[in-house]
Image: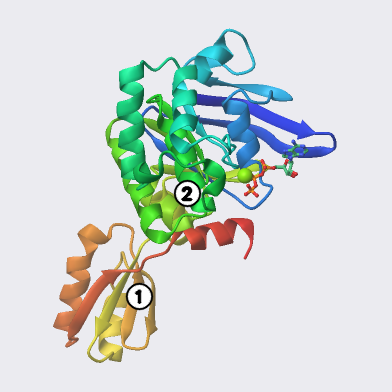
Amino acid sequence: MIRMENLTRTFGEVVAVEGLTLEVDEGEVFGFIGPNGAGKTTTTRMLCCLIKPTYGTAFVKGNEIGKEPDALNIRRIVGLLPEAPGLYERLSSYKNLDFFAQLYDVPAVKRRERIKELLEMLGMWKRRDEPVNTFSKGMKQKIAISRALVHDPEILFLDEPTAGLDPRAAKTVRDFLSELKQEGRTIFLNTHNLVEAERLCDRVGVINTKLIAIGSPKELKERFWGRTTVVQLKKLSPNVVAAVKALPFAKNVRTEDNSLLIDLAKPEDENSEVAEVIIRSGGEIQFMSELKHTLEEVYLELIGG
Ligand SMILES: Nc1ncnc2c1ncn2[C@@H]1O[C@H](COP(=O)(O)OP(=O)(O)OP(=O)(O)O)[C@@H](O)[C@H]1O
Ligand SMILES: [Mg+2]
């Protein structure tokens, strides 16, 4: 759906984005994470044809960025939530949305339906006639999110959609993004919220001018730490430790308080045998679970804590 080939952008001496080559599949939620100034917004702006690359190129549903009439086609099929809401401050939220929907040639009846649906979902319908300049930051963000969706785009580019939203509103937006995903829409998401990225994204790219790593959150975690089973015992005895260490597939067996930590290649297949030898050597198991790492830990490893 989106293909970048050596995509590069400089601003004078500053290299904002360097040599990005990656693909985002149709129906995928792809997250872009990376520090401030890493080039996330610049990439989004290139893909939405707001600025041209210095070098390299990209295709959005077969249309090449920076080329006409391709760029016009891209603008038609994408929805963009930019970093700054950029609304018409003196117009009401309804008029803002109606104006943008008209630009996208959405028929009048459909416009009203769609605007109502979006504003109701985000709890802003009651305030539809008030000018945007009387709204709080989060409220403006909700209007900007609605604007990105008002023409029912196939591909959505969201630059930090939940930044500035209260926890409940952020959850509403996340749930809504999950719904859009169910509908098969492609979503390109820039975010600093790693819990959000982990929950929503099929794959994430870690960027710091260049692409540093890419994969599903699960793959990225396993790349660093493999998989570890934690067995909490009533009491840890040398017998039990020795028995587990003797298992040929148990790697890096270590202890922590009353727990055994064991690296396993296929815990789903190997855990029952682990349990068996523990019980046979007199151990009493209280809990067995997988040691969970977070995307935040991966991020800090990659970017440097
Ligand atoms: N219009 C511009 N003129 C000059 N430099 C720019 C411009 N836009 C971006 N840059 C530079 O490009 C680099 C990447 O910026 P970008 O906004 O893409 O980062 P980002 O990953 O979105 O960061 P953040 O997480 O803070 O939003 C930065 O060094 C920034 O100063
Ligand atoms: Mg940005």
Image-quadrant location for residue 249? bottom left
Q: Distance from label 2 to label 1 (Cα)? A: 47 Å
The C terminus appears in which quarter of the rendering? Answer: bottom right
Query: In the depicted view, which residue is nearer to us: 193 or 62?
Result: 193
- The residue to which callout 2 is attached is 139
| N-terminal label among 2 and 1 | 2
- Image: 97 above or below 207: above
Where, quadrant-wise, is the N terminus in this rendering? top left
**Image coords of residue 77 (percent x, y):** 45, 20
Mark 2 is surrounded, within 10 Å at the Cα level, by few (under 14), some (14 to 19) or many (20 or more) other residues, namely many
Residue 81 in percent (x, y) is at 51, 37
Q: Nearer the viewer, residue 99 or 205?
A: 99
Q: Is residue 250 above or below residue 26?
A: below
Which amino acid, mark 2?
Answer: Met
- At 30% from the left and 83% from the top, the residue drawn is 242
* Circle 1 crowding by C-alpha within 10 Å: few under 14, some 14–19, many from 20: many
- Tell which of 10 and 78 is nearer to you: 78
**151 with respect to 234 (left or right):** right
Q: Residue at x 33, y 63 (%)?
A: 264
Task: Decide if residue 144 is in sight here.
Answer: yes
Percent coordinates x, y for residue 241 in the rendering: 30, 83
Is residue 222 left or right of 213 when viewed as pictured? Answer: left
Task: Check disc 1 and report the residue beneath it.
Answer: 261
Secondary element at tag 1: strand
Image side of residue 220 versus residue 248, left or right: right
**Of discs 2 and 1, which sits in the foreground?**
2
What label does residue 214 carry, if any?
none
Here the colouring is rainbow
Quarter of the rendered structure image containing ligand 1: top right
Residue 1 seen in render: no
Image position of 295 (left or right of 5): left
Where is residue 234? Give x, y as percent: 22, 90
